[in-house]
Amino acid sequence: MIKLGLVSVTFRNKNVEEVIEIAKRADLEAIEWGGDIHVPPNDLKNAKVVGEKTIKAGLACCSYGSYYRVGAYGDNSMNSFIPVLETAKALSAQNIRVWAGVKGSEQTDSDTRKRIEEESFAIVEEAKKEGMTVSYECHGGTLTDTLPSYMELLENVKKIAKNNGKDSIAYAYFQPYASMPMKDVYEYLEKLNPYLKNLHVFNWKVVDGKIHRLPMTSDGDYWNDIFKKVRNMSDRTHYALMEFVKNDSDHQFLEDAKVLRDFLN
């Protein structure tokens, strides 16, 4: 099952109430609240209020979109993660999104990679105690920047868990890199399937070396194929989370949401 949602950082210029309002107008089912503007870590009172408003509006707090960089805090990692976890708990989030390191896979040495994998297992276990999962952002400049590196990370965290008598895993987000061929998209989805949590949804194209945001009506129908692929592979619930529409426009967002909703119906 795929449910349609919103990444709140799409509208950094809006307050919490306005984000909830446009999500409702677009007939969405969930919000991934960002940790930079709307729900910063350590402000538990705010997180609780945002969570309550979201749920009261009939929307799920499907994820806390943190900017926690696994492996970036040295021996202070758990002390750095706990405020993120407590904020996600106050928000009533189902999942915590994290970033896998601070460098791309080719720039990350084996010792650093091992530290990221071990810390990933540790934070997955802490989140599990609170009934939450942990998922990696799919992004350049981190260990998820290529499919082989992404899979190595996911599988090694699973191995560490197994070696510690646990069956827990870290999960994966997926987003197609700009102008990624569909054959590569399908390969990502097939390989990531056992770990796949949510999708970040946008329509970007590279033109003359620059990324341009486009309406979903402009060749955005590849998302229809992606949704079909995910539905055929998985019987789990996944959230397709819209982000960063053309010109940050409310009208464009609502139009794009309608296109995506049609794909899902």
Image (cartoon, helix red, strand yellow):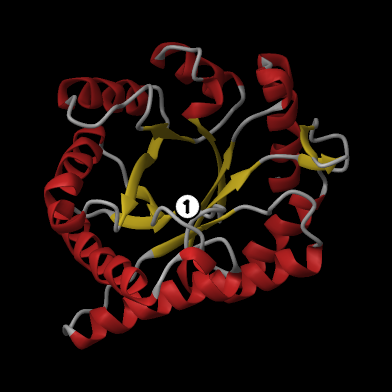
Residue beneath the point at 35% across and 40% down: 66
Q: Residue 236 vs residue 112: left or right?
A: right
Q: Dot 1 surroundings within 10 Å: few (below 14), some, or many (20 or more)?
A: many
Residue beneath the point at 71% across and 58% down: 226
Closer to us: 42 or 220: 42
Quarter residue 85 falls in: top left
Residue beneath the point at 79% across and 69% down: 183
Total labels: the figure holds 1
Q: Visible in this render: residue 95?
A: no
Residue beneath the point at 75% across and 40% down: 204
In the rendered view, tell whether residue 35 sits above or below residue 100.
Answer: above
Mark 1, residue position: 137
Quarter residue 186 falls in: bottom right
In the rendering, at what x and y percent does residue 77 appear? Answer: 18, 54
In the rendering, at what x and y percent does residue 69 appear? Answer: 34, 50
Q: Looking at the picture, which amino acid does disc 1 mark?
A: Glu
In the rendering, at what x and y percent does residue 2 appear? Answer: 57, 52
In the rendered view, tell whether residue 253 sits above or below residue 105.
Answer: above
Quadrant showing the C terminus? top right
Closer to us: 215 or 111: 111
In the rendering, at what x and y percent does residue 95 appear? Answer: 34, 49
Closer to us: 93 or 69: 69
Quarter residue 110 falls in: bottom left
In the rendered view, tell whether residue 219 sits above or below residue 212.
Answer: below
Quadrant showing the N terminus? bottom right
Q: Dot 1 lies on which element?
A: loop
Q: Residue 168 vs residue 138: left or right?
A: left
Q: Visible in this render: residue 199?
A: yes
In the rendered view, tell whether residue 152 sits above or below residue 35.
Answer: below
